[in-house]
């Protein structure tokens, strides 16, 4: 069973009440005190929230407000020329290739978007990533996918104050087995 937050449940309830099948003509409408519906705010034309709903809304707004942890990744938003090193055999030197990365911010400064284009193992390589900070968990998160797989790499971790030195851990579904990742 899916559980929705109380605010979402209230929105669904209001949407159901406003559906055409339940519409009433003005002569059929009962005063709010007789329908059990919240009283309307005259100034705003919106139902007034209960104290519990107001507290929930404040918590959601606080959790959704970008802060310094979101500004740090934003400072890295620009274009880069990169060198890609990949080790496929611990006894041999890494393969070295090049590419470009474009970093931009989205969702009103909440999420860093990374677009990588280059080559890997002599093949065209493209990848897309998202990185953000979760105010609720207090951790950074990262999602990565590319044209060499059909899955995602999902990690979370911590960063220094400038978000330049970060340590993330998670896993990747290799075609053979699930591989833990630390980056």
Image: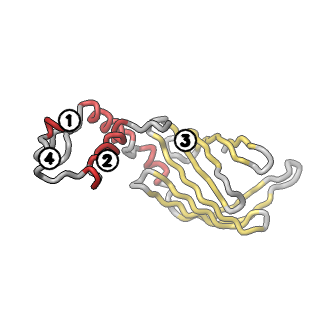
- Residue labelled with disc 2: 16
Instruction: Please give the name of the residue rendered at 64% of the width and 40% of the height, measured from the top-left corner.
Output: 169
In the rendered image, residue 144, in percent from the top left (x then y), is placed at: 62, 53
Is residue 146 found left or right of 91 in the rendered image? left
Which mark, by number, is residue 17? none
- Residue labelled with disc 3: 159
Separation of residues labelled 1 and 4 (CA atoms)? 12 Å
Separation of residues labelled 3 and 4 (CA atoms)? 57 Å
Q: Are marks 1 and 4 in contact (CB under 8 Å)?
A: no
- Residue labelled with disc 1: 36
Separation of residues labelled 4 and 2 (CA atoms)? 16 Å
Secondary structure of the residue carrying tag 3 is strand
Secondary structure of the residue carrying tag 2 is helix
| Mark 1 neighbour class, 10 Å CA radius: few under 14, some 14 to 19, many 20 or more | few
In the rendered image, residue 11, in percent from the top left (x then y), is placed at: 32, 44
Q: Is residue 96 above or below residue 155?
A: below
| Mark 2 neighbour class, 10 Å CA radius: few under 14, some 14 to 19, many 20 or more | few
Instruction: Please give the name of the residue rendered at 72% of the width and 60% of the height, measured from the top-left corner.
Output: 148
Q: Nearer the viewer, mark 4 or mark 2?
A: 4
Image quadrant assignment for residue 146: bottom right
Q: Nearer the viewer, residue 181 or 34?
A: 34
**Dot placed on the residue nearer the N-terminal end, 2 or 1:** 2
In the rendered image, residue 163, in percent from the top left (x then y), is placed at: 52, 46
- Residue labelled with disc 4: 29
**Dot placed on the residue nearer the N-terminal end, 1 or 4:** 4
Secondary structure of the residue carrying tag 4 is loop
Q: Nearer the viewer, mark 3 or mark 4?
A: 4
């Amino acid at each position: 069973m899916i559980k929705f937050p109380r605010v979402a449940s209230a929105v669904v309830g209001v949407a159901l009440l406003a559906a055409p099948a339940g519409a009433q003509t003005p002569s059929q409408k009962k005063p709010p005190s007789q329908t059990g519906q919240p009283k309307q705010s005259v100034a705003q034309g919106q139902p007034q929230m209960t104290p519990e709903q107001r507290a929930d809304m404040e918590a959601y707004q606080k959790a959704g407000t970008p802060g310094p942890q979101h500004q740090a990744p934003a400072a890295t938003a620009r274009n880069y020329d990169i060198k890609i090193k990949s080790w496929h055999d611990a006894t041999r030197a890494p393969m070295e290739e090049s590419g470009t990365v474009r970093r931009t911010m989205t969702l009103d400064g909440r999420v860093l978007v990374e677009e990588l284009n280059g080559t890997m193992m002599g093949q065209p390589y493209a990848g897309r990533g998202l990185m953000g900070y979760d105010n609720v968990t207090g951790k950074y998160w990262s999602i990565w996918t590319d044209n060499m797989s059909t899955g995602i790499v999902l990690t979370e971790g911590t960063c220094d104050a400038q978000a330049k030195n970060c340590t993330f851990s998670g896993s990747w579904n290799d075609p053979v087995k699930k591989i833990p990742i630390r980056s």
